[in-house]
Amino acid sequence: MAFYLNCVTSVSNSNRFLGPKITRKYFNASRPDFDWLNQFQINSSRQINYVGTVSSFVSVEQLDYFQQWIDIFTQTCSKIIKNFPAES
C-alpha cells in the first residue's frame, strides 16, 4: 500500500506545483481518521513507509479508507491546482 501512496505523491503534479513540504502537509491532512492508516508515515522527502505489522491481506474496510485518503488528497490539491486529477 505504501508503494501506491508513494506513486500518488511522486507522480502527481502536487509535488511539482506545491513542493514536497506542502505535498506532505496536504497528504497528512487528508488522511481519514482510521487507525490502520496511522501506520503509514510520511518523511520529509515525501517517502511513505508502513510501520505496522504486515499481514497477508488487506480488508475491504481498509481499502475503502485507503481510497478515501487518495480521494481527499486529490480533492484538496484540486482546489489549488486546476485540473489536478487530469494533470497528474
Image (tube, rainbow, N blue to C red):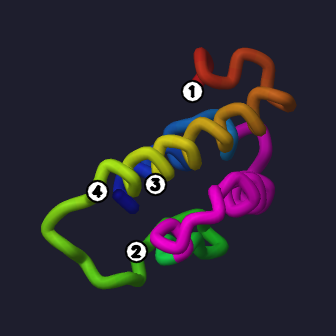
Residue at screen point 28% across, 56% down:
59
Amino acid on which disc 2 is placed: Tyr
- Identify residue type, mark 1: Ser
Residue position marked by numbered label 4 in the rendering: 59
Q: Is residue 70 left or right of residue 2?
A: right
Query: Closer to the observer: label 1 or label 4?
Result: 4
Q: Residue at x 39, y 61 (%)?
A: 2
Residues at marks 1 and 4, CA–CA distance in whole angstroms: 27 Å
Question: Is residue 65 or residue 21 the one in the foreground?
Answer: 65
Q: Nearer the viewer, residue 70 or 17?
A: 70
Residues at marks 1 and 3, CA–CA distance in whole angstroms: 13 Å
- Please report whichever mark, 2 or 1, sits nearer to the chain's N-terminal start: 2
Along the line of sight, which residue is nearer the eye, 84 or 29? 29
Whole-Å distance between the Cαs marked 3 and 2? 11 Å
Range of residues picked out in magenta: 16-38
Residue carrying label 1: 88
Residue type (three-letter) at the residue carrying disc 3: Asn
Question: Mark 4 or mark 2, which is nearer to you?
Answer: 4
* Disc 2 target residue: 50
Q: Is label 1 in contact with label 3 (beta carbons under 8 Å)?
A: no
The residue shown at (60%, 68%) is 45
State yes or no: discs 2 and 1 in contact (Cβ < 8 Å).
no
Provide residue 72's location: percent of width, then percent of height: 67, 41
Disc ID at residue 6: 3
